[in-house]
Amino acid sequence: MGYRTFSELKESYAFILPLIIFILTFILLPVLGTFINSFFRDISFLQRKFIMFENYKQLFNDSGFWEAIRFTILFIVVSVPLEIILGLIFALILNQAIPFRGFLRACVLLPWAIPSAISGRLWELIYNYNYGLANFLCIKLGISTGPINWLGSSLGAFFGVVIADVWKTTPFVTIILLAGLSAIPMDLHLQAKVDGANFLQRFYKVTMPLLKPVLIVALLFRTIDALRIFDLVYVLTHGGPGGVTTSLSLYSYKYFLAGDFGYGSAVSVMLFVIAFTLSLIYIKLGRFAELGT
Amino acid sequence: MIEERFKSILIWIGYVFMVVFCLMPFLYMMLISVSSSPDFLTKLDNIEFTFKNYYSVLTSKSLHFIDYLRNSIIVSGVSAFFCVIIAGLGAYSITRLALPGKMLILFFVLAVSMFPQISLIGYLFKFMSTLGWINTYHALIFPYIAWILPLSLWILVSYFAQIPKDLDKAALIDGCTRWQILRKVIFPVAAPGIFSVSLLAFIFAFNEFMFALMLTIDYHSRTIPVGIALFQGLHGEIPWGNIMAGATIAVIPVVLLTIIFQRNIMQGLTRGAIKG
């Protein structure tokens, strides 16, 4: 690194300063503010009052909070593996010499590129009980004898959210895994082929072990992202029916909306702690691919 | 070769499934947007083609659709522009200058990018209310820049790290300042990276929902995702034709950008995620 003169040091600080100021002011300060707020009774039009851990105590006896945790965990457990499997299949196909590859990659990217609030609205129509595409297909393909009450039943709403999310985020997984796949040298496959391995054996013995680090990155990345799910449930189900698809983010938002900033903050602090723990694991594991070198 | 044949059949099944899975909802959206009634699947023999949904969305002042779209494009464009410059300065400092604790800053920024938005918004709302910024463009632009900076920084660092340091030295000897080097040497050489980051930043800002939902009130600053999410009919029945026409117009910018610049977007995203 050589020696550092004072002016060089000053220059390096000056260049990074805008970035640090922005992140401190508009991310770190709000997080800190939310954390402090969670120790207050802070409801619109009422006197703000310091109440220590009262919000957190209330949280532990709040069945709505536990239901939000239950939904969020179930959602992660069901949707993330589906996204990884489907993303892997898509990536394997896109890594082959197939016609229109560039066009196909663009197609796969499209669901990722559009706003999730808009895709939520689109899926709301697809799930329409009377004339939606989902029921049309389910009946035409013989999956179901009558129309399914997608957004009105708890099971239907849960899988409705899962399918819409899988559609929206599989592209992201595909891109990450495709990059991992294209880094695997062709020679290894040819060598295995010469040794008489069929394509399934080549997949398990050559591709999978080499892809594992990238798979773990995709898995953690998706888990952290699925943990914060908000847009889709807000638009598609509003957390219903009866609160069964209310995620932690949405639960907290509902308190903010009602003007209860203390309790809403406590809920989001809990979510923050979970997400932060996961991201520390991610960063620790991520070190296998040291930056740019 | 039976095995090869089997493999190619599997690939083709997957191929077709992939295309149908990704594109069908889009086709459905466009079909509904040009049909006179959303229940056209139940009366396939009697389809009525119409442009009235597009017409009413684009001309009806009370729907404010054009306002939402304009707000979205301004907010996303300005956010992406400043985000690239600020991230570029930061990436230059990290890859080129004698900044102490570079790795610490990079990992700190990475951790920040994984914060849940909801853990900011409660305080951010109060903060913006105190400043009197609610329902303005800058109430969205400032948090958007901060929110997109981490990813932008990571991508740009990975691009800048590949540029030979000799270029800087040559420019320094020629009497350039660091700022001139960044502007006249690094930015042009890393143009593909700069471009990828601008695209991604624009798409992320364009798609953002929660901040826009909390920090805007009406058409003066409300962005298109929120506009479409809260779009309700006047008479109870949801105007699906209008919503789908609006959605189709709203996704045209990002869909075009994605199709044309598919390669840049893939590269950018890959560098942002894998190098972490």
Image: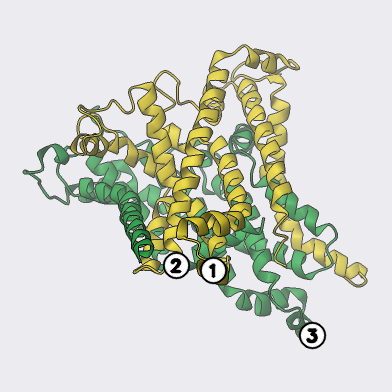
Give neighbour class at mark 1: few <14, some 14-19, many 20+ (Cα, 10 Å).
Answer: some
Colour applied to chain B: green
Horizontal side, residue A3 vs residue A271: left or right: right
Q: Which residue is mark 1?
A: B195
Q: Position of residue A3 (x, y in %)?
A: 93, 71
Q: Which residue is mark 3?
A: B175
Look at the numbered disc 1 and give the secondary structure of its residue.
Answer: helix
Closest to the observer: A292 or B144? A292
Measured in 3D between alpha carbons, the distance from the residue under mark 2 to the one under mark 3, in whole angstroms, is 37 Å
Residue farthest toward the front in the current orientation of the protein: A196
Measured in 3D between alpha carbons, the distance from the residue under mark 1 to the one under mark 2, in whole angstroms, is 10 Å
Residue farthest toward the left in the current orientation of the protein: B45
Identify the colour scheme used: by chain
In percent of the image, x 70 and y 74: which residue is there? Answer: B182
Query: Eyeballing the image, is B98 above or below B120?
Result: below
State which quarter of the image contains the N terminus of chain A.
Answer: bottom right
Residue A180 seen in the figure: yes
Query: Eyeballing the image, is A176 above or below B126?
Result: below
In percent of the image, x 27 and y 27: which residue is there? Answer: A148
- The answer to whether marks 1 and 3 sit on the same chain is yes
Q: Nearer the viewer, mark 1 or mark 3?
A: 1
